[in-house]
Amino acid sequence: MKISIKKLTFKSIIGILDFERKNKQKVIVNLSFEYDFKDDEFINYAEVSKLIKTKMKKEKYYLLEDAIKELSSLLYEKYNIRNLKLKISKPDILKDCIVSLSL
């Protein structure tokens, strides 16, 4: 089975610039992964979404790289998944583009 979560959008402190440390900014997370579905073992996508939002809001990452690294480790530790694709975007940080980092 494959789960995809697209455009998970929330506000969080993330970045190294002074104004990024003071003001929450819009963040968009896209991810997908595969897992072996069994009748009594499934992955709750609502739980995954909440976990990502909670972790990012709590940690207030300085770098997208750190967020990607920690989130991917957390997902692999908590769930029996494979082929994780994870992308974090900051759509409002620059006026003329969307900045993203992918795993």
Image (cartoon, rainbow, N blue to C red):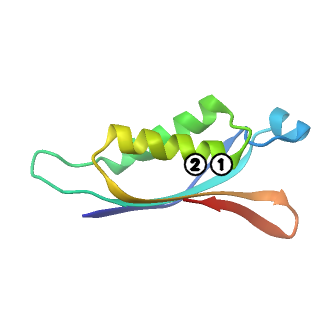
The quarter of the picture where residue 56 lies is: top right
Which dot marks residue 55?
A: none
Residue at (19, 57) in percent of width and height: 36
- Residue at x 26% of width, y 57% of height: 35
Answer above or below: position of 26 versus 13. Answer: below
Identity of the amino acid at label 2? Ile
Q: Nearer the viewer, residue 24 or 71?
A: 71
User: Residue 11 in the image: x percent, y percent?
Assistant: 68, 44
Residue 41 shown left or right of residue 101 in the figure: left
Q: Residues within 10 Å of mark 2 (few under 14, many from 20)?
A: some
Secondary structure state at the residue bearing disc 2: helix
Label annotation for residue 65:
1
Q: Which residue is drawn at 86% across and 70% down?
A: 96
Q: In this view, does 49 lie to the left or right of 13?
A: left
Q: Which residue lies furthest to the bottom in this view?
A: 96
The one nearer the camera, 73 or 19, is 73
Task: Please state, as top left, top right, bottom left or bottom right, where the N terminus lies in the image.
Answer: bottom left
